[in-house]
Image (cartoon, coloured by chain):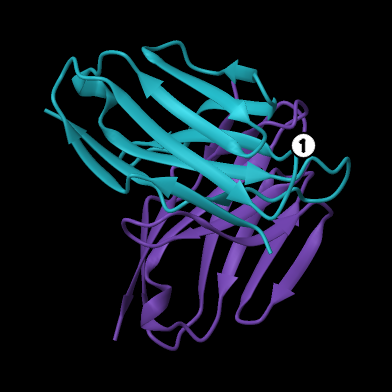
């Protein structure tokens, strides 16, 4: 069966510090990978998605970046955090099958507080 | 623009039935999803509708009308553990998911 791991679960960072959130998927190959952010009372906001190693699509221009160094590894980074980067970050994966629901499965999430 | 509307909050009684509505306006349609999200946790998949009609899965059912841009999630025999937010999402013509802000469901004994 497939599992998705995301860490760290919680972090508190000062403004201007760097960020690295990591996500790995087990039990599948060549998954689609996603980074979402969820602000209180708002819908999930897609930040980045990837259909393969080194292939990253950015949905929202900001000071965050993503990388996919391995097939089942997805990393969210920032060189300098802003207060507005605080939020709940979710990694997700889906199958790349040409038909069917291709349901998104989420990691446990990372709650980031920037002070 | 693309839009998903669902009520912000609903309250229901343990053992009762509740219906959570979702209306959408998107560029194309390739399926509608319902997810459950407990406070502080990740969303978990509940149901998927791509054709009109009712999909039943235990105590939960989901209905879709593509011509009306409308779906609902029906929860029967409510339990306290059903207290959560319920997220509606639509996959558009570009296969991107458009998410509603979620409906917070409060269950009272």
Q: Is residue A2 visible?
A: yes
Give the residue at x 26% y 13%. A80
Query: Which is more toward the observer, A33 or A42?
Result: A33
Does A56 sit left or right of A28 as displayed? left
Give the residue at x 79% y 44%. B67
In the picture, the quarter occupied by the C terminus of chain A is: top left
Q: Is residue B13 visible?
A: no
Q: Position of residue B70 (x, y in %)?
A: 66, 49
Q: Position of residue B17 (x, y in %)?
A: 50, 79
Instruction: Determine which quarter of the picture holds residue B61.
Output: bottom right
Give the residue at x 55% y 81%. B76
Query: Is A34 placed above or below A102 here?
Result: above
Query: Which is more toward the observer, A94 or B8?
Result: A94
Query: Which is more toward the observer, B71 or A41?
Result: A41
Q: Position of residue B6 (x, y in %)?
A: 49, 48
Q: Colour of chain A?
A: cyan
In the picture, the quarter occupied by the N terminus of chain A is: bottom right
Q: Which chain is purple?
A: B
Q: Which residue is mark 1?
A: B29
- Badge 1 local density, few (<14 within 10 Å), some, or many (20+)? some
Count of labels shown?
A: 1
């Amino acid at each position: 069966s497939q599992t998705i791991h995301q860490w760290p679960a919680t972090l508190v960072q000062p403004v201007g510090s760097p960020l690295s959130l990591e996500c790995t998927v087990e039990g599948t190959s060549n998954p689609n990978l996603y980074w979402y952010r969820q602000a209180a009372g708002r819908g999930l906001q897609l930040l980045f998605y990837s259909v393969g190693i080194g292939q990253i699509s950015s949905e929202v221009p900001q000071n965050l970046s993503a990388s996919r160094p391995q097939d089942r590894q997805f990393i969210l980074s920032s060189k300098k955090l802003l207060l507005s980067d605080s939020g709940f970050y979710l990694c997700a994966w889906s199958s790349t099958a040409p038909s069917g629901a291709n349901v998104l499965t989420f990691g446990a999430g990372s709650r980031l507080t920037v002070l | 623009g693309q839009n998903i509307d669902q009520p912000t909050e609903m309250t229901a009684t343990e053992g009762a039935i509740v219906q959570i509505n979702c209306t959408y306006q998107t560029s194309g349609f390739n399926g509608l999803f319902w997810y459950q999200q407990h406070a502080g946790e990740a969303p978990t998949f509940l149901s998927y509708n791509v054709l009109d009609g009712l999909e039943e899965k235990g105590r939960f059912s989901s209905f879709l009308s593509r011509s009306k841009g409308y779906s609902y999630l029906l929860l029967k025999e409510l339990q306290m553990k059903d207290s959560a937010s319920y997220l509606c999402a639509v996959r558009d013509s570009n296969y991107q998911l458009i998410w509603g802000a979620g409906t917070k469901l409060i269950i009272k004994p």
